[in-house]
Image (cartoon, rainbow, N blue to C red):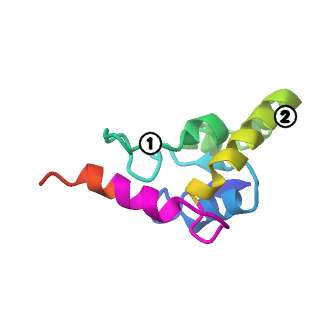
Amino acid sequence: CLCPTGDICTTSRFVSSISAGCIPVVLCDGLEGPFGRKVGPFLNAVPYHDFWIKYPVGAFMRNPAGLISKLRSITPQELERRQGLLREYRRSVILQAPATTAGTRYLEEVADCIHV
């Protein structure tokens, strides 16, 4: 599912694609996950880089068809691996999924960002 940037990198398209079980194709150079590159025991608990497909915005602007070539070059085994990881971490991202852990995970990540 194509997830171009909006006003910010983290858009509802990103979460909606995960909710639908569709591998996000991210068009935002700055997106590193909900809390960026910060470090802490709970931050980056979801390995987004392992299941999303990220394509440089500049490359897309110069040659949009390059994205199609990149997507076509991904092997069925790689797509299956990414979809498996997406299914594995889905409940850590989607707030309204059955047995979700997303709310707890978000609070843990926020706690890591606060220096008291």
Name the residue that disc number 2 marks.
Answer: 72
> Residue 83: percent from the left, percent from the top?
76, 43
Q: Is residue 56 left or right of residue 81?
A: left
Above-or-below relation of 13 to 59: below
* Image quarter of the N terminus: bottom right
Residue 105: quadrant of the picture: bottom left
User: In the rendered structure, which segment of residues is drawn in magenta?
Assistant: 94-109
Q: Residue at x 79, y 40 (%)?
A: 68
Q: Amino acid at mark 2?
A: Arg
Is 112 included in the stretch rendered in magenta?
no
> Tag 2's secondary structure?
helix
* Image quarter of the C terminus: bottom left
> Residue 5: percent from the left, percent from the top?
54, 57
Asked if residue 75 can be seen in this view, the reply is: no
Which residue is more in the foreground, 104 or 47?
A: 104
Q: Earlier in the sequence, mark 2 or mark 1?
A: 1
> Tag 1's secondary structure?
loop
Q: Residues within 10 Å of mark 1 (few under 14, many from 20)?
A: some
Mark nearest the camera among 2 and 1 is: 1
Q: Amino acid at mark 1?
A: Asn
Q: CA distance from mark 2 to mark 1?
A: 28 Å
> Residue 61: percent from the left, percent from the top?
61, 45
> Residue 102: percent from the left, percent from the top?
52, 61
Q: Residue at x 57, y 37 (%)?
A: 49
Q: Residue at x 48, y 56 (%)?
A: 9
Residue lying farthest to the right in this orientation: 76
Q: Residue at x 44, y 42 (%)?
A: 44
Name the residue that disc number 1 marks.
Answer: 44
